[in-house]
Amino acid sequence: MSAPAHAPRSVVLCFMLSALGAAGFAASYVIGLGNEALGVSIGAAFAFLALGLARWSSLISAAEPEYVEERSIGPTPQHEYDAFKQALIEQPVPRSWVLWGSLGTAVAAIGGAALFPLRSLLPAMGTDPDAVLSRTPWKAGLRLVNEEGLPIRPADLALGGVVTAFPEGLDPREHVDTTTLLIRVDPSILQLPAGRASWVVDGVVAYSKLCTHAGCPVGLYVDTADQLLCPCHHSVFDVATGANPIEGPAPHPLPQLPLGTDGDGYLVAEGDFSAPVGPSWGNH
Amino acid sequence: MPSLLPSLLSRVLPHPRPMRKLDERLGFASAGRAALAKVFPDHWSFMLGEIALYSFVFLVLSGIYLALFFEPSTAMVVYHGRYAPMRGEEVSAAYASAVRLSWDVRGGLLVRQAHHWAAHLFIASIVLHLCRIYLTGAFRRPRELNWTIGLTMLVLAIFNAFAGYSLPDDLLSGTGLRIFNAIALSIPIVGSWLAFLAFDGEFPGQEIIQRLYIAHVLLVPALLAVLISVHLAILIRQKHTHFPGPGRRDANVVGSRAWPAYGLRSLSLLAAVFAALLLAGGLLQINPVWAWGDFDPATVTAPSVADWYILWIEGALRLFPPVEFQVFGFEIPNQFWCGVVLPGLIFGALYLWPWLDRRWNDDREPHHLTGRPRESPLRVGLASAMLAFMAVLLVAGSQELIVQWTGWTVGSVRDVLRVLVFVLPLIAGFAGRWVAESLRRSDLDHAVELGHREMVAGLRRRNRPQAQ
């Protein structure tokens, strides 16, 4: 193994350039230069360091032979292995099922007990998750408001108009399951499931905005075809027939919210959605 | 005056020198000498795992810096910073601190972007390393254990990248979390309980950012650090595999010594990884959270395309038909198949692969001399099929881009991809197997020419003799 006797000039040059890059980074930081200057200077410092080290290593490799190392891995000789096993199970550690079994029970019990505090990760619900998922805070008489919190009259929507609506007085960020889409269509095209004729006010229909596939907001409305498109997995829902899925992976229609008006002519809910909103879950 | 330095040093340094003092206490010199003489094979493909290791080092270092500024909280705050369009707006503390990191913390954007690029490089280099191990048969006995540890690290890396992507509480990451929540909900019987445990109730919950933060900065990195240590300890114990060549046997390793040749080369790789990540962090914009806007559960960005390491699941979710049926009275939600079953099958098959391969080839012998990929046409075929399958899913995950380019409808693009997802893997699988078999046959036919080529390659290596 004979490394070059003198310092290789190319390697030294690389290291000096690397130091220069680092100094450039410090200067860029102090001056307050942009992200590009910071990245290029510190990147160059590391790049020249890499170049110098690579060159140095290749100079050494060129002067060196290829080394051979024997591999000594393999099973331990039988008598040594037996001795190891003997030491492991030697007296005074008896092979008693009662002793080992009780130790195992204690360890398993401690492990099991340690899982119980995980339940504290659940919020206080007073009921099981399935019941929480099955309903939303919508109820008869609750006003619909827009993103600014203002109540909505049917006439506020032009034909083909869409508004995202929430229940009055509730934080929409906390009650995501209430997010509703109001769409005004020509009443003559509506072919809603039986019993829903009275859920529509002046051609305004209300559907849950949460896709029944993975829960994304169904954000795109194609007014020429009266279709709703989910941008996540491209499910398409037909507004006229009760938001039935006609394309893509969504298996269920968007639940519909029964609408009515209050004494002031503002839109109110007449009850909860026609089905649980959002994605199906495993204990449905 | 080169002779000045050593004499100066010997006067400055106390006598005896610190290294000797340490050795007096620890007695490491003979073990250290053996470690310096450890032999590493010289082949570029053995550097892929090292790239992953150095990306992890970079992720930890840059992540510590980011953690000093990031605030993992969904409490609403008013942003007062340099990013004018957002000034005075009420957003979550997590989002505000991510924007502040990008606009107001000097050097913050560089570290944030380099950290995100490092996550990509970390996962990509693990995947390529896995391909190398798989195609050369290095997973075979006695390395099954390290194969499973490596796979576990890949799963953890993907999870942690997803968690980190979700932390800034921007609109894009919120959509990702919504889908993650729907997949958790879909697990039969326990799904709703699991989702409520993770999210503190119904989506979005108040706690998910804090919980992901602890997982992202502590739990998963600590697990990864432990697994990396075990992975490397097993590697050192078993020593590297190497490719066949003159003087190379199962019972030895041929290559460069750890110090200085290999050590310097590896340090050079470390510096190169850092250089690439910092240059990318400075020059290539990634995840501009201020442009997405803060998370609003009632809106969504369109197009919404996830990062590639998770995008294949998105693609599968898009292609899957809208079926839902009951098993033993329990409805199996649609998203269960692509969100849980598909990744479970893929990773399950990968975990079992050493044992499946052993049964298929009826080969239980230990192997330290690996083959070229062509020596196992079956493995090449399966890998080609798998990569083609993943490629179609990635395209499906970004199909809105195809819709934009081609002008076709979403439905017709989806129909084409639904066919391709089955046909392309079959074609690629058989093609891969055929190519590997042809290459292997031509190797046998032209054994003499190959010998000549090997000789030239050997000369190019400056005729390095072998020494013990």
Image (spheres, helix red, strand yellow):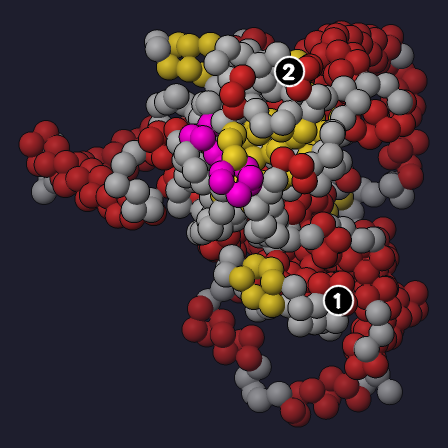
Q: Position of residue B361 (x, y in %)?
A: 58, 10
Q: Is residue B93 left or right of residue B444?
A: left
The chain identifier of the residue carrying mark 2 reads A
Q: What SS does tag 2 mark?
A: loop
Q: Which residue is mark 2?
A: A190
Of B169 and B20, nearer the camera is B169
Using the image, determine if residue A24 lies above or below residue B75. Answer: below
Residue at the (41%, 34%) spot, across then down:
A140
Count of marks overlaid on the render: 2
Image coordinates for residue B244, horizontal then vertical, percent: 72, 27
List x then y, in percent, for residue B207: 44, 51
Q: Is residue A264 shown in magenta?
A: yes
Chain letter belonging to callout 1:
B
Query: Magenta region: which residues?
Result: A262-273
What residue is shown at x 47% (from left), y 55% (from top)? B210
Residue drawn at x 56%, y 66% as measured from the top left = B77
Residue occupying the point 45% across, 40% down: A142
Nearer the observer, B29 or A227:
A227
